[in-house]
């Protein structure tokens, strides 16, 4: 059986993209997945949550991981990893341009990247969604009174991500969504549906309270209620409609939602820098 080594990195949203491209190879091409979790040895911003989903194979040893090498040594890294892992090493381009991975499916593979494109796992979308949803439900840690359906509200998720997006690197790459984006999105939701109750998911509660002071019928769902991203994403997915930020975390919440009539509003420009390719959306999502 051929093997696919997948490097996991970044936050939980990015980890789900990496899992999905690997799972597609496992289901469609009969590869065995070997997870590489070594990135998280020295990464403090986000934890390795995807390991809880369960993998049949053990994690890759550190000295066989691309995390062992600095980015500037890429030519040497490629040679080393291919020789010692008996595989073809494919690193996603910095601009995140789509790569036709199916052209390499005759080889053992080592994938290093974010893979933020639906085409990387479109063959097995239903199964992958089902697996991730089961995972979220299994590991959620608390019950929430927020989603009380006594008054038959239409719950609208708003994701206001700020904390790590304020650093210089992320501002130059992602940028920060303006208040006008959320105003337009809320007005649009209100034209389509009534009795909307807005659930604002945020990592900056004080700033979010000021930013959304104009909005009535709202509840803030922040880290004071629950701190782990698995539970947070679970509650995001059970909302009815979605106003996502330029974050893969809320992208996945909207994508995993089982509501067939959901409205998803997303930023037309995912990255502020034109250097990067835009993340892919489902066709029905509304870009503003």
Image (spheres, grey):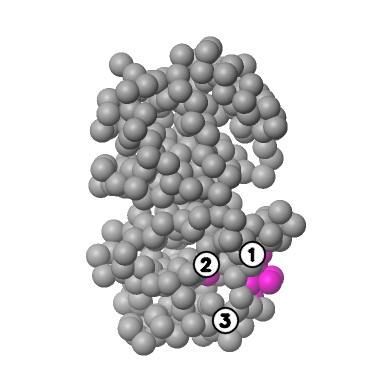
Q: Where is mark 1, residue-wise?
A: 175
Q: Please check the rendered image and state whether residue 203 is part of the magenta-colored stretch, yes or no.
A: yes
Indicate the secondary structure of the residue bearing disc 2: loop
Q: Where is mark 3, residue-wise?
A: 180
The residue shown at (63%, 29%) is 74
- Are discs 1 and 2 less than 8 Å apart at CB? yes
The residue shown at (49%, 82%) is 184
Q: Where is mark 2, residue-wise?
A: 269
Where, quadrant-wise, is the N terminus in this rendering?
top left
In space, the residues marked 1 and 2 are separated at their CA atoms by: 10 Å
Q: Is residue 178 above or below residue 13?
A: below
Indicate the secondary structure of the residue bearing disc 1: loop
Q: Is residue 62 toward the left or the right of residue 283 in the image?
A: right
Q: Nearer the viewer, mark 3 or mark 1?
A: 1
Residue 60 drawn at (x, y percent) = 52, 20
In space, the residues marked 3 and 1 are separated at their CA atoms by: 14 Å
Q: Is residue 255 above or below residue 39?
A: below
Q: Nearer the viewer, residue 178 or 127?
A: 178
The residue shown at (58%, 45%) is 94
Q: Which residues are magenta?
A: 200-209
Among the two numbered marks 3 and 1 on one chain, the one whose residue lies closer to the N terminus: 1
The residue shown at (56%, 38%) is 9
């Amino acid at each position: 059986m051929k093997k696919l080594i997948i490097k996991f990195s970044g936050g939980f949203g990015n980890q789900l993209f990496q899992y999905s491209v690997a799972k597609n190879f496992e289901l469609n091409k009969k590869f065995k997945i070997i997870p590489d979790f070594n990135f998280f040895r020295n990464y403090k911003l986000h934890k390795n949550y995807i390991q809880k989903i369960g993998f049949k194979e053990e994690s890759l040893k550190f000295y066989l991981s691309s995390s062992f090498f600095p980015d500037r040594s890429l030519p040497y890294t490629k040679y080393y990893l291919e020789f010692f892992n008996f595989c073809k090493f494919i690193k996603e381009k910095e601009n995140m341009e789509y790569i036709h991975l199916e052209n390499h499916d005759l080889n053992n593979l080592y994938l290093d990247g974010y893979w933020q494109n639906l085409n990387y796992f479109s063959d097995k979308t239903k199964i992958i969604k089902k697996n991730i949803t089961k995972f979220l439900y299994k590991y959620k840690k608390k019950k929430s009174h927020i989603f009380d359906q006594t008054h038959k509200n239409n719950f609208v998720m708003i994701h206001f991500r700020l904390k790590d997006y304020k650093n210089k690197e992320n501002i130059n790459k992602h940028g920060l969504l303006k208040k006008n984006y959320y105003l337009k999105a809320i007005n649009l939701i209100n034209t389509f549906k009534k009795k909307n109750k807005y659930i604002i998911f945020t990592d900056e509660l004080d700033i979010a309270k000021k930013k959304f002071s104009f909005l009535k019928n709202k509840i803030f769902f922040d880290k004071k209620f629950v701190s782990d991203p698995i539970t947070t994403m679970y509650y995001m997915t059970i909302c009815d409609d979605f106003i996502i930020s330029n974050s893969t975390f809320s992208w996945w919440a909207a994508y995993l939602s089982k509501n067939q009539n959901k409205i998803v509003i997303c930023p037309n420009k995912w990255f502020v820098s034109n250097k990067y390719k835009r993340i892919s959306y489902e066709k029905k999502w509304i870009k503003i």
